[in-house]
């Protein structure tokens, strides 16, 4: 996941100045640029996204005295660490020869963070050992890095124990970090594999016992009452609060349970509103099939499902019929944006309702669950920034959907501090547009001119632009299959290519060969892994049944099957979102959570095409991403 070093040849001259302490004056032929002594406050606020940024930085270093050398290099290394340039940051850190204890501690804290990000765990351990008997070992930074190291080494009991200690330290040293650390522990416990759970069960300290108990109480596979008897689950959670009154997990509870239990409505009647006739009938039938497969497999007590066809009547009329005449206590649907807008314009939401698309409105009782590719860009942008890709090219195909997606990506990327190198549409002459955006068209023009002056063949290697470090393609599979080979022809080289799940449209490896190495976020075809968490068993079981009943059409149908399954599980367990901050529902289309506006957030797997097959990128881990962000935040 770490960005490969593509800057080094570009900034070679600057590095010579940096490490040689050269005092030679700038050439008289150089541009009229006046460099001043480097300001540390200015450096702390600087980001490095272009060659010009680095040129200025390295020219300024020559004016810094020897006495300030360590402070300078440490400051530069910290800035490059924040920009996820870990390899260059560690190379600069090598130049530090600590004189004071503060310099020694800062050097090894930064080194541990850099090597953890680069997955050089032996070097990270060595750096942490250097700090074991120093004052730094009592700081929140050290404890965060130590916790992360234990996680990467698979020592889960040591990991949760160290994380517990870090959480207590954060309460005093960095109060703003306490809740994110509790959330990290909660996410880690919910995502733990059986082997990790067994490690934890071998230890009886209270923090571990409390986390295990909370996980089991809220896991529908460990505790069937989560689905069948919510009132019993709420009582069990209240008992947990009493038993573990000092546990940090109490900070996750968002509401007073007894009051919530008294106000909680029964879920004996659920309405499923879908356009079962009309042009969306096929998708609706897949959703309905998965919903009922999950329903019959789990058998909620005394629960009845009523189906309403929004293809036959206005969605607001069906909503009124369900809630007023039939007494339905929970609604799932409608499916399309048009139906949702029709519903919201024609009636007030009076019953907990989960619509299966997104909308700009968010009434109090409305939740939104969308599979739109735009919902994936937040996770993609976060991963790119943390991996050091801060200067992408953005390509769209000219369609309104592609343009909207490109704009949403651009907006989110800039909000995270990144800089778009260029954004262009390739809807006309695709080859010409790619050559122009890669900058090879000028080299080719010069070559043609030179060749016109010579009778002998002239061989040349075209130059490409140097200000981009990655490429984002906001288009579907057909255009992306054409664009990737063209980009490689025009010397995109080692620039990673990112896209969305729009490119994952067939399981045919021959059709997908031209997508090889493209990176995107999606869910695997089947939500199962060897030694998967127990809570994964239910989606796996249901999807296996659906695949058996529809082997030839399963790939084309699995997203809608997943939507139906996820909608059912949300209808049964979503009340825990009201109770516990950070509660995760393991669905087919991602690990699901709900934000304060009622939008369902999907945590997806990072995937990459290899030999025409979309595979999970084993280097990506959602908990690791959280640690990368936390350790960035603590030095920001």
Image (spheres, rainbow, N blue to C red):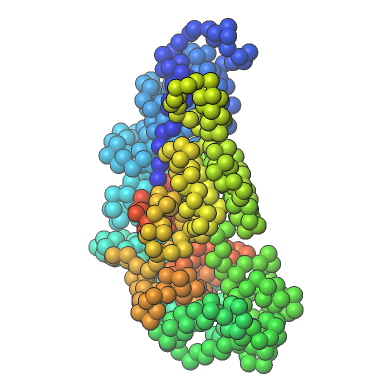
Residue 613, percent across and down?
37, 58
Q: Is residue 143 visible?
A: no
Q: Could you tell me which residue is drawn at 56 percent across and 34 percent down?
A: 441
Q: Could you tell me which residue is drawn at 37 percent across and 56 percent down?
A: 612
| Image position of 27 with respect to 93: above or below | above
| Image position of 401 with respect to 464: above or below | below
| Image position of 264 with respect to 51: above or below | below
Depth order, front residue of 509/241: 509
In the shown orientation, is residue 540 left or right of residue 572? left
Q: Could you tell me which residue is drawn at 61 percent across and 14 percent down?
A: 31
Quarter of the picture holding the N terminus: top left
Q: Quadrant of residue 128?
A: top left
Depth order, front residue of 70/390: 390
Q: Could you tell me which residue is drawn at 47 percent across and 33 percent down?
A: 80
Q: Quadrant of residue 161?
A: bottom left
Which residue is at the far right? 346
Residue 301, percent across and down?
45, 89
| Image position of 19 with respect to 569: above or below | above
């Amino acid at each position: 996941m770490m960005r490969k070093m593509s800057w080094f040849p570009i900034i070679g001259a600057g590095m010579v100045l940096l490490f040689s302490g050269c005092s030679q004056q700038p050439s008289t032929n150089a541009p009229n640029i006046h460099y001043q002594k480097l300001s540390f406050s200015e450096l702390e606020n600087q980001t490095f996204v272009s060659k010009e940024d680095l040129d200025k930085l390295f020219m300024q270093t020559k004016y810094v005295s020897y006495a300030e050398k360590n402070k300078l290099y440490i400051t530069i290394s910290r800035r490059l660490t924040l920009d996820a340039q870990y390899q260059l940051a560690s190379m600069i850190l090598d130049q530090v020869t600590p004189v004071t204890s503060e310099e020694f501690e800062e050097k090894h804290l930064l080194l541990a963070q850099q090597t953890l990000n680069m997955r050089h765990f032996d070097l990270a351990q060595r750096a942490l050992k250097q700090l074991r008997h120093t004052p730094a070992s009592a700081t929140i930074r050290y404890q965060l890095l130590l916790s992360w190291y234990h996680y990467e080494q698979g020592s889960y009991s040591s990991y949760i124990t160290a994380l517990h200690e870090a959480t207590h330290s954060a309460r005093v040293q960095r109060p703003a970090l306490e809740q994110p650390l509790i959330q990290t522990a909660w996410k880690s416990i919910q995502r733990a594999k059986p082997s990790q759970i067994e490690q934890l069960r071998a230890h009886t300290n209270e923090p571990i016992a409390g986390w295990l108990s909370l996980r089991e109480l809220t896991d529908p596979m460990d505790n069937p009452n989560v689905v069948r008897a919510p009132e019993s689950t709420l009582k069990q959670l209240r008992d947990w609060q009493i038993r573990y009154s000092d546990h940090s997990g109490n900070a996750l509870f968002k509401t007073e349970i007894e009051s919530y239990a008294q106000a909680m409505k029964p879920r004996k009647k659920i309405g499923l509103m879908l356009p079962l006739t009309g042009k969306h009938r096929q998708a609706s039938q897949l959703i309905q099939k998965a919903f009922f497969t999950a329903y019959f497999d789990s058998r909620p007590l005394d629960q009845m499902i009523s189906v309403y066809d929004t293809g036959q009547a206005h969605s607001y009329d069906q909503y009124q019929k369900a809630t007023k005449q039939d007494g339905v206590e929970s609604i799932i649907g409608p499916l399309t944006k048009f139906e949702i807008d029709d519903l919201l314009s024609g009636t007030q939401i009076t019953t907990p309702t989960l619509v299966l698309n997104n909308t700009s409105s968010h009434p109090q009782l409305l939740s939104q669950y969308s599979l739109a590719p735009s919902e994936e860009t937040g996770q993609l942008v976060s991963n790119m920034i943390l991996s050091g890709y801060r200067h992408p090219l953005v390509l769209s195909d000219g369609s309104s959907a592609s343009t909207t997606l490109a704009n949403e990506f651009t907006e989110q990327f800039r909000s995270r501090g990144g800089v778009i190198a260029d954004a262009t549409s390739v809807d006309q002459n695709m080859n010409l547009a790619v050559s122009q955006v890669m900058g090879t068209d000028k080299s080719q023009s010069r070559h043609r001119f030179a060749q016109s002056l010579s009778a002998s063949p002239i061989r040349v290697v075209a130059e490409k632009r140097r200000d981009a470090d990655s490429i984002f393609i906001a288009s579907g599979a057909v255009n992306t299959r054409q664009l990737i080979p063209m980009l490689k022809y025009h010397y995109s080289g080692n620039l990673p290519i990112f896209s969305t799940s729009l490119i994952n449209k067939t399981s045919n490896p021959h059709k997908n060969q031209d997508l090889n190495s493209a990176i995107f976020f999606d869910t695997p075809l089947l939500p199962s892994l060897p030694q998967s968490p127990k809570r994964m068993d239910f989606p796996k079981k249901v999807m296996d049944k659906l695949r058996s009943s529809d082997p030839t059409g399963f790939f084309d149908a699995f997203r809608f099957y997943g939507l139906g399954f996820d909608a059912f599980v949300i209808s049964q367990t979503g009340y825990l979102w009201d109770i516990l901050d950070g509660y995760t529902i393991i669905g087919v289309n991602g690990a699901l959570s709900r934000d304060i506006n009622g939008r369902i957030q999907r945590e997806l797997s990072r995937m990459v095409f290899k030999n025409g097959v979309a595979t999970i990128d084993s280097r990506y881990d959602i908990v690791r991403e959280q640690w990368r962000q936390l350790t960035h935040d603590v030095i920001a």
